Image: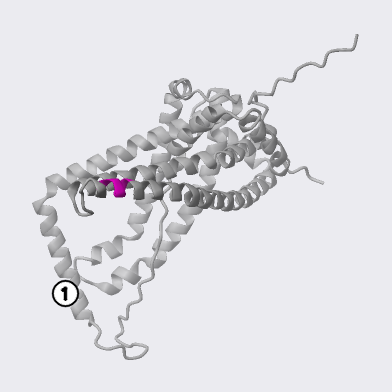
């Protein structure tokens, strides 16, 4: 029977997580890990949603629901909208460019920090010692290399998406609704699905390549080449790894949702009571609900409460990503090479009887 490395790493990951976080319990370590995880995933994951738009280019319909706009009216509406947007862009172009550049700068900065923190997280769990500033200094170059690779992949994916939408984009100025909503959809969804699959596979290999970069002192492309070369000789192990990681991801996601709900209910109630007390104090001081002072104080309290909830959720769910990282590292150590000198707990020697 084949020894599935990913399955065997589960027990070891649970032991390592317990030793790191509970033997002994160190709140400072938890807080530092929560800060690292915030920069890795707290703002980095952008969920996307879709909506279905049903049009009727042929003019037939399934029942009479009253007057509906004709294709000519829709075309006129699109042309008017495009004209209005063009006029607005022309009038405020300088401000729009500055706003876009500022937003892009913030996104780039946090993306770079997130890539550096991925190395900080690996070093923290391997050494069982969280020293954020020292690990950041050690991995500024590694983070930059990973940042460039991830952005290159992201730009390539975005370019493919834009190319798939070119027929629709070129039809917008003409108000051709049918081309906009139907002309590019098959190609768009094909590119989207294939892109997501390819990026997911690459992301899995990149996460395995990060420790190789750290402990073999090689660049990201060299580390990625080493990992993929190993995968080519043990495809079954990699497939089982992906399956187990997918199942673990679902389990950990459910656990995170339950823990988050509990934190929100408990901490949210406390924060709500604080808000009520603050409002009552403002009322006793003679400030009404619509007074600027009340609005500023309550608005600031709302923002602070939201940030506190995020931090408490990250703090309460620290064991989940730590377990996930240990599982990936233990799989890598047994599958690729024994490259990670894991910290081991020091056991006191038992004195011999005299």
Give the residue furthest to the left. Answer: 91
Magenta residues, as a range? 278-282
Q: Secondary structure at mark 1?
A: helix
Quadrant of residue 112 in the image? top left
303 or 283, which lies in front?
283
Above or below, 167 against 62 in this view is: above
One can see residue 285 in this view: yes
Q: Residue 93: x, y in percent?
A: 13, 48
Q: Is residue 143 left or right of residue 71?
A: right
* In the image: residue 70, left or right of residue 232: left
The residue sitting at 32% across, 88% down in the picture is 60
**Residue 146 visible here:** no
- For the residue pair 144 and 302, the one nearer the viewer reads as 302
**Residue closer to the observer: 294 or 1:** 294
What residue did someone put label 1 on? 76
Of residues 167 and 336, the one nearer the viewer is: 336
* 220 in relation to 180, above or below: above
In the rendered view, would you say 101 is above or below 184?
above
Residue shown at the point (14%, 69%) measured from the top left = 80
Query: Relative to residue 349, is residue 274 drawn left or right?
Result: left
């Amino acid at each position: 029977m084949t020894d599935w490395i990913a399955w065997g790493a589960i027990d070891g990951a649970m032991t390592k997580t317990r030793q790191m976080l509970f033997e002994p319990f160190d709140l400072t370590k938890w807080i530092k890990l929560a800060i690292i995880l915030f920069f890795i995933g707290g703002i980095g994951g952008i969920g996307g949603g879709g909506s279905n738009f049903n049009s009727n280019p042929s003019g037939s319909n399934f029942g009479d629901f009253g007057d509906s706009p004709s294709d000519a009216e829709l075309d006129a509406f699109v042309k008017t909208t495009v004209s209005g947007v063009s006029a607005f862009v022309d009038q405020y172009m300088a401000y729009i460019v500055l706003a876009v550049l500022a937003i892009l700068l913030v996104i780039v900065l946090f993306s770079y920090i997130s890539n550096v923190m991925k190395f900080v997280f690996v070093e923290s769990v391997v050494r069982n010692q969280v020293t954020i500033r020292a690990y950041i200094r050690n991995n500024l170059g590694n983070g930059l290399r990973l940042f460039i690779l991830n952005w290159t992949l992201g730009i390539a994916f975005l370019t493919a998406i834009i190319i798939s939408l070119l027929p629709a984009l070129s039809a917008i100025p003409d108000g051709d609704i049918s081309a906009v909503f139907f002309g590019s959809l098959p190609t768009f969804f094909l590119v989207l699905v294939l892109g997501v699959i390819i990026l997911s596979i690459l992301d899995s290999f990149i996460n395995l390549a990060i420790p190789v970069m750290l402990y073999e002192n090689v660049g990201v492309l060299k580390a990625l080449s080493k990992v993929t070369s190993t995968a080519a000789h043990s495809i079954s192990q990699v497939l089982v790894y992906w399956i187990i990681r997918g199942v673990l991801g679902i389990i950990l996601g459910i656990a995170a949702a339950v823990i988050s709900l509990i934190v929100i209910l408990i901490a949210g109630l406390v924060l709500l009571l604080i808000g009520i007390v603050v409002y009552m104090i403002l009322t006793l001081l003679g400030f009404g609900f619509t007074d600027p002072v009340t609005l500023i104080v309550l608005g600031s309290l709302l923002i602070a409460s939201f940030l506190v909830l995020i931090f408490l959720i990250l703090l309460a769910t620290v064991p989940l990503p730590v377990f996930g990282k240990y599982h990936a590292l233990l799989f890598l150590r047994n599958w690729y090479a024994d490259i990670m000198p894991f910290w081991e707990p020091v056991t006191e020697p038992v004195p011999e009887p005299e």
